Each structure stands twice: as structure tokens, then as C-alpha cells.
Image: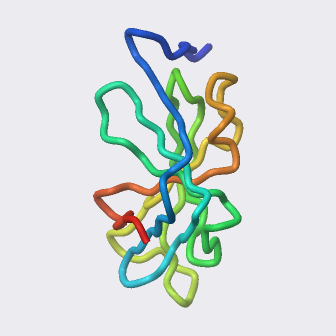
């Protein structure tokens, strides 16, 4: 079964640009990411999303979950859950982040970046 693939355009614009200044992502008191190299993705009328370079994310605090999703504009997303000190997911804090590891051609700028759910993680200017 083939998945739909769409290109951003006037009916569904997607813009990506460098974030002004540094940003950080905090969840359950843990600093998950801090970067002065973050990207801002603005898709249509959705709230903007900050994408952090993978090198600026503390991957020791995250573990890949079994969740995945498909966006016809960006491609397949992989998800990550928060870990506790014993490497088990924290109850109620599953799928705190996602990444398009091999995004569709129009979204190559976000390859190697990770974004966080605003409902689960505080993302703010640092």
C-alpha cells in the first residue's frame, strides 16, 4: 500500500528557518535539549515547532518507542519516550519527541533533528 506524498505549496505552506537565539527543552525537571542551532518549522496554520539538532539532545534520557506516523509532507516519524534512571519509560510521558530520520525531499532540512511535544515538554528560549 502506497502512502500519499505531497509537496508544500500555497494551499499548505511549510517554512523552515534558523531559530533566533538558543532554545532548550525540559521535561520532568530534566534538560532534554539545549541548542543555539535549532530550527523553526511553521506548517500551515499549526503552531510553530522547534527542531533541535540530534547532537544537542541528551539521547541518554530518551528511548525509541514503537510509535510511528506518516505525514504526507514530511514522511515517516519515529518517536521517543522519556527514560527514568533505570531506563524504563516514565509513566505518562511516552512519546515526548519525534524525528523524521529520512524526511521527504522537500523537508531535508529537518533530517537529523528532533522535536518535542509542547503538551509534554517545555520548549523555550534559553
**Camera sees residue 77:** yes
The colour mode here is rainbow
Instruction: Point out residue 22 in the picture as x, y percentages from the top left corner.
Output: 51, 65
Seen at 32% across and 69% down, the residue is 92
- As drawn, which residue projects farthest toward the bottom? 85
In which image quadrant can residue 26 be found?
bottom left
How many marks on residues? 0
- Check the picture and name the quadrant holding the C terminus: bottom left
- Check the picture and name the quadrant holding the N terminus: top right
Task: Give whichever of 48, 29 is nearer the camera.
Answer: 48
**Camera sees residue 66:** no
55 relative to 98 in the view: left or right = right
Task: Give whichever of 126, 1 is nearer the camera.
Answer: 126
Instruction: Point out residue 111 in the picture as x, y percentages from the top left corner.
Output: 68, 42
Instruction: Point out residue 57 in the picture as x, y percentages from the top left corner.
Output: 61, 68
Height in image: 1 above or below 70? above
Height in image: 6 above or below 54? above
8 relative to 120 in the view: left or right = right
- As drawn, which residue projects farthest toward the top? 10
45 relative to 51 in the view: left or right = left
Seen at 53% across and 23% down, the residue is 73
Height in image: 64 above or below 48? below
Instruction: Point out residue 45 in the picture as x, y percentages from the top left corner.
Output: 29, 28
Task: Give whichever of 11, 96 is nearer the camera.
Answer: 11
Amino acid at each position: 500500500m502506497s502512502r500519499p506524498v505531497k509537496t508544500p505549496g500555497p494551499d499548505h505552506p511549510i517554512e523552515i528557518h534558523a531559530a533566533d537565539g538558543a532554545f532548550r527543552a525540559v521535561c520532568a525537571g530534566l534538560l532534554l535539549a539545549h541548542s543555539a542551532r535549532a530550527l523553526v518549522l511553521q506548517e500551515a496554520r499549526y503552531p510553530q515547532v522547534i527542531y533541535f539538532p540530534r547532537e544537542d539532545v541528551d539521547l541518554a534520557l530518551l528511548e525509541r518507542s514503537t510509535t510511528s506516523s506518516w505525514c504526507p509532507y514530511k514522511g515517516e516519524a519515529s518517536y521517543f519516550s522519556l527514560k527514568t534512571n533505570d531506563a524504563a519509560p516514565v509513566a505518562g510521558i511516552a512519546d515526548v519527541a519525534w524525528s523524521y530520520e529520512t524526511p521527504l525531499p522537500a523537508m531535508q532540512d529537518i533530517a537529523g533533528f528532533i522535536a518535542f511535544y509542547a503538551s509534554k515538554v517545555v520548549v523555550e528560549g534559553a
